[in-house]
Image (tube, helix red, strand yellow):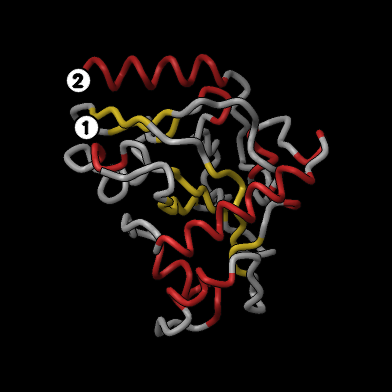
């Protein structure tokens, strides 16, 4: 079972602008919840494997034009498996960082605030640093090597220590690289509906 130092990357996709109903509601940062929309249910959040995440810390990495950025590193999570999806929950004391000010995991030019993570994907046969990272972590559920995970958490703690209130997302959309076509203005209602659906199956 993972311990508190275990770090697993969850790669968050960018909003699909061609989908008018796209809201990108999940993760529900305010409620410390991820997975109820069915995100990653075939890999990281697979209902038959999600129990393996118990006690792990999830590094939520958001992609965008400025690179892949670490918008949140959760406290240890608690998994719950439902019939057709899974959920991880954590003690949510703050919102994530805004995408613009979050630590850089990898920039288009190859810069990283967490150099040890680059060693994991630098030799992947894909064009560009962004493509290499996405190829390696899109479906990965293996924890980061201990030293890499520790470095990531140190970077995260240092960034939080330096943060001012305006660095944190006031709305979930500020953790995204750009606004989705539709904004979820009823976060509590959406969350309650998805949880009820998951529990009903």
Q: Is residue 120 above or below residue 169?
A: below
Front in this rendered view, residue 183 or 148: 148
* Label 2 Cα crowd, 10 Å radius (few <14 / some 14-19 / many 20+): few
Q: Secondary structure at mark 1?
A: loop
Q: Residue at x 50, y 27 (%)?
A: 32
Front in this rendered view, residue 173 or 96: 96
Which numbered circle lies on residue 201? 2
Q: Is residue 31 left or right of residue 46?
A: right
Q: Please name the residue that numbered disc 1 is placed on.
A: 84
- Quadrant of the rendered structure where residue 201 is? top left
User: Which numbered disc, 1 or 2, marks the residue that appears first in the sequence?
Assistant: 1
Q: Is residue 59 left or right of residue 81?
A: right
Q: Secondary structure at mark 2?
A: loop
* Label 1 Cα crowd, 10 Å radius (few <14 / some 14-19 / many 20+): some
Q: Is residue 120 left or right of residue 94?
A: left
Give the x, y percent position of residue 82. 23, 27
């Amino acid at each position: 079972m993972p311990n508190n130092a275990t770090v697993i990357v969850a790669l968050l996709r960018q909003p699909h602008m061609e989908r008018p109903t796209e809201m990108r509601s999940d993760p529900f940062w305010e409620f410390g919840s991820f997975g109820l929309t069915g995100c990653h249910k075939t890999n990281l959040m697979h209902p038959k494997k999600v129990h393996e995440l118990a006690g792990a810390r999830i590094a939520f990495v958001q992609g965008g034009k400025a690179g892949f950025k670490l918008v949140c590193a959760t406290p240890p999570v608690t998994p719950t498996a439902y019939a057709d999806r899974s959920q991880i929950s954590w003690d949510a004391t703050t919102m994530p960082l805004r995408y613009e000010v979050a630590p850089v995991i990898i920039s288009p030019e190859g810069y990283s605030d967490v150099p040890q993570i680059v060693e994991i994907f630098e030799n992947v046969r894909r064009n560009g640093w962004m493509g290499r990272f996405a190829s390696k972590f899109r479906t990965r559920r293996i924890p980061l090597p201990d030293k890499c995970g520790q470095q990531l958490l140190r970077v995260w703690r240092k960034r939080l220590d330096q943060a001012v209130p305006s660095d944190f997302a006031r709305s979930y959309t500020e953790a995204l690289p750009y606004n989705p076509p539709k904004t979820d203005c009823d976060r509590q209602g959406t969350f309650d509906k998805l949880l009820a659906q998951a529990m009903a199956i």
